[in-house]
Image (cartoon, helix red, strand yellow):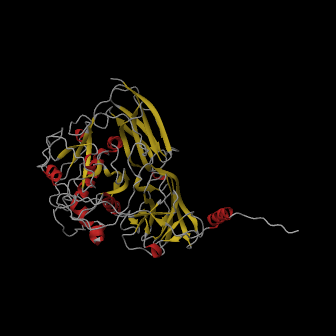
Amino acid sequence: MNSSIRVSPAVMLLALIICLASTGYSQAPSQGPTRPQVERDVLPGRGFVPPPVILSHLTGKVSSTPVQLSALPTRFDWRESGMVTSVKNQGSCGSCYAFASLGNIEAKLLIDGEATYDFSENNAKECNWYEITGWGGGTSCSGGSNYQMANWFSKTGTVLETDDPYVSADVSCDGGNPYQKTLLDWRIICDETIADPAVIKQYIYDHGPVFTTMYTGGDGGDPAWQAEFSGYDGSYTLYYTGSTEPDHAVLIVGWDDDLVHAGPTNGGWIVKNSWGTSWGGTCGYGAESGYFTIAYGSASIGMWSSYMHDWQDYDSDGNLLYYDEGGFTSSWGYAAADGWGLCSFIQPATSYLAQVEFWTNDVTTDVDIYIYDDFNGSTVSNLLASKLNLSYTEAGYHSVMLDSPPEVTIGEDFYVVIKVTNVTYGYPVVGDYAGPSESNKTYLSEYGTPGSWFEMGDNNGVDVGIRVRTSVDLPVAVTDVEGPVPSGYSLSHAYPNPFNLNTTIAYSLERRGYVELSIYNLMGQRVKTLVSDIMPAGQHSVAWNGTDFAGKVVASGVYLYQLKTGEFVDSKKLVLLK
């Protein structure tokens, strides 16, 4: 007697999916939404043009952001602690994006304990890839975005104003000037949604002034608002009810919840403009004009907000290997939160693969980095280095220092693979369609398994946004430290403790890496960041004088100091007695 077993189509489909996932299958990815890039008429003195990628899931709202909110003062102004550089004047050129971006970087360096820098907006607007190639209408006085600036400063760096003075016109790039600081980490707070004021306040308080955008009537759509903003004298707080897309980039340096304006509730931002000191006012601090105050959320202020998170001194002996000339211009994936990217590189000079850099487009729960010696178009093999279990609370640009950088000789090829797991966004791998695409150099995969790699250049005209920063010198390791070498990571007890305004905190690092050492009160609010830098292996100490971010002495009581480096985290208590 013959018998048969019937299998439902759903079961057969499931079996096929499992089979493909386990054996590998080169499936074409889909592209996330993008914004058409069209040339715009930029009104003099404005110049923000939205980036090509649409990340509408990045809303900067309390309910959707992982930033830890804490009780903050009703007024906070980074100028009061000397952490904001002087007001500049962009003139009639539509280059606000360069001024706001560099103002953010200059302030971050001051907060990190560096000297006062005045960087060249002229170099930023004239020498970046978009202006040199003219893609999307170029930048210079035709407008640009923080995305374009992050791309430029990460690939090269900043130039001093004295080396390339500002010209309020579209002029040729002077590319022979030395670079000073290179961007390593840049974070996106929100996309085309006005970020919640509570969220922006927390970022300002924790990290420094924030790049943001607003509407100033530059499209001619509201002549009355255009005239009011253009003629603003700083004597009152601006309020505008419209919701038109921004046309101008500015730098938020603080807030005041008691500002009175025409809106239904009090409160607003303290903002640095780039229209010189004959415009605006001092807005509650100092003698330098050029600032304005505006109601929270008014005139679309808060859209496309971002900030620089980390940097390094420019390395003239190193190289940055990449194919994404245009930076972050598109997102790709398989309608799933995780995806894999691969880039094939050839080493131009014998050196160490020190850092792997990449873009993300969502909050990530896991990022894994692998470097292989071989790839045959189907399978990667011979692992050289890896860095696993990373995560990021913001989208943006990130640089990861490898614990054991492999040395690769000139002419050798190597392959960098990154797995990205987003919280929700189904196009987790960032790509660039603006620049010329490479053939058989960048790939995407749904599973990261053999046979699943899809070549992007010839098929989609896209390059995956993965980069490698090389160094001639091996980053400082335990064997390079003079004296006793720490056998691990540790955070020592502060001395003296209790203390009266001055105490010293010691810590040990087994190897070179990024270190963050911060002071918190018992409510979990960050009071001050003492260290936020890449530190060499060895014994270190840092003093705290009992002051907060604004330089004001904190109240007597119990505080926590916390050390973060790699996967090591430790906290201890200390007591301030006055």
What's the residue at 40%, 52% (across, down)? 58
Q: Work out which quarter of the rendered image holds the C terminus and state it.
A: top left
Furthest residue toward left: 278
Residue 146 in the figure: left or right of residue 19: left
Could one spot residue 368 in this view of the protein?
Answer: no
Q: Name the outermost residue toward the top.
A: 578
Above or below, 476 relative to 287: below
Figure disc tally = 0
The location of residue 5, given as percent across then percent down, is: 78, 64
Q: Quadrant of the N terminus?
A: bottom right
Residue projecting furthest to the right: 1
Question: As displayed, is residue 440 above or below residue 294?
Answer: below
Q: Note whether residue 69 is visible.
A: yes
Is 74 drawn above or below residue 406 in the view shown?
A: above
Q: In this rendering, would 436 be left or right of 288?
A: right
Res 119 → quadrant: bottom left
Q: Residue at x 25, y 62 (%)?
A: 124
Against 374, is 84 above or below? above
* Residue 315 vs residue 103, the one in the foreground: 103
Residue 152 x/y as whole percent: 32, 62
Q: In this view, does 503 lie to the left or right of 423?
A: left
Task: Provide residue 432's location: percent of width, then percent of height.
Answer: 40, 67
Could you say which is closer to the camera, residue 324 or residue 318? Answer: 324
Residue lying at 30% horizontally and 69% vertically, measured from the top left? 136
Horizontal and vertical percent position of residue 91: 15, 58
